[in-house]
Image: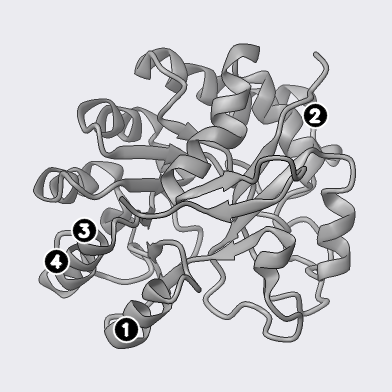
Amino acid sequence: MREFDVNVFDAHIHTEFNGMPDNFSGIECSLASYKESIADIRFVGSLSDSASPSKEHGDLSQLGIYHCAVVQSLDYDFTSISQSLLSGEKLAIKINVGFIHRYASDDVFQPLYSLASLLKIPVMFHSGDPGWPHAKIKYADPVSLDEVAVDYPDVNFVLVHAGNPWFRSAAAVASKNTNVFLEGSSLIDGDLRTYSDERANRLISKPLSWILDYLGTSRKLIFGSGWPMVHLGSYIDAFSKGLPEEAWEDVFCNNALGLYGLRVAQGESARLVRMAKS
């Protein structure tokens, strides 16, 4: 393995911090476990898509952990979402299409896209296999997200999980639309230390390599892990093997910071601050 020495912003973690072991990896979902997982990484921050993040640990942004406003049902609270974005408590909107049985283009979501346009914040979609028997895959098909990207060209959209396993469809949508980005979390769930290198290569490294080759740029892909559903260190290892070394800084950090309006503070190692909206 080539030496890995770049800043890492993890664009997809879970922060319930309830102390329970994850069903896939067995890794404990706790703040102490999370701190241990990033101890040997040049970590600068992360984004949680937990609908119910822990409220017992104070302001997690002091630890570089930020949150998005998660939409997981049709009766979402628009006022609450607006307030959380305006206050800076949340950095983005995450819509769990697939789990919600409506296409992203449905009228019920249009107020959220208008809000995102007004506030200049990104909208994230679960894309690809939802991994839940009551979800309906057709609503999370990456191709179905193209319509919204076209209709709202001034909003940046992130296809979480990069459409897994429909990487070609997700890459086509991202290549066509300048405002669409791919995030590569949970391409395999579990502790990769227990998997063969061949399986990790087949399901993580090779698809990522193909995506970058197809897109022809490293500026449209962002790193996410899905922790604690994966072992962070081994996931970074498999992820990096799918990328040329010159793409690491963009994919593992810079692209996400630009999307979510963050930057590393000058003169202060690994501390993020919000960028002013223009």
Separation (CA) of disc 4 from disc 3? 17 Å
Q: Residue at x 71, y 28 (%)?
A: 238
Residue 231 locus on image (x, y percent): 79, 47
The total of numbered circles placed on residues is: 4
Q: Residues within 10 Å of mark 3 (few under 14, many from 20)?
A: some
Q: Amino acid at mark 3?
A: Ser
Where, quadrant-wise, is the N terminus in this rendering? top right
Give the label, 3 or 2, closer to the camera.
3
> Mark 2 highlights which residue?
196
The answer to whether the residues at label 1 and label 3 have Cβ atoms under 8 Å apart is no
Give the label, 4 or 3, closer to the camera.
3
- Hey, which quadrant is residue 181 in on the image? top left
Residue 90 locus on image (x, y percent): 47, 69
Q: Residues within 10 Å of mark 2 (few under 14, many from 20)?
A: few
Q: Which label was assigned to residue 117?
A: 3
- Hey, which quadrant is residue 237 in on the image? top right
> Mark 1 highlights which residue?
76
The answer to whether the residues at label 1 and label 2 have Cβ atoms under 8 Å apart is no
Q: Amino acid at mark 2?
A: Ser
Sooner in the amino-acid sequence: mark 4 or mark 3: 4
State the scheme by which the image is colored: one colour
| SS at mark 3 in the image | helix
Sooner in the amino-acid sequence: mark 1 or mark 3: 1
The answer to whether the residues at label 4 and label 3 have Cβ atoms under 8 Å apart is no
Going by the picture, which residue comes out furthest to the front? 267
> Mark 4 highlights which residue?
106
Q: Residue at x 67, y 24 (%)?
A: 240
Separation (CA) of disc 1 from disc 2? 42 Å
Sooner in the amino-acid sequence: mark 4 or mark 1: 1
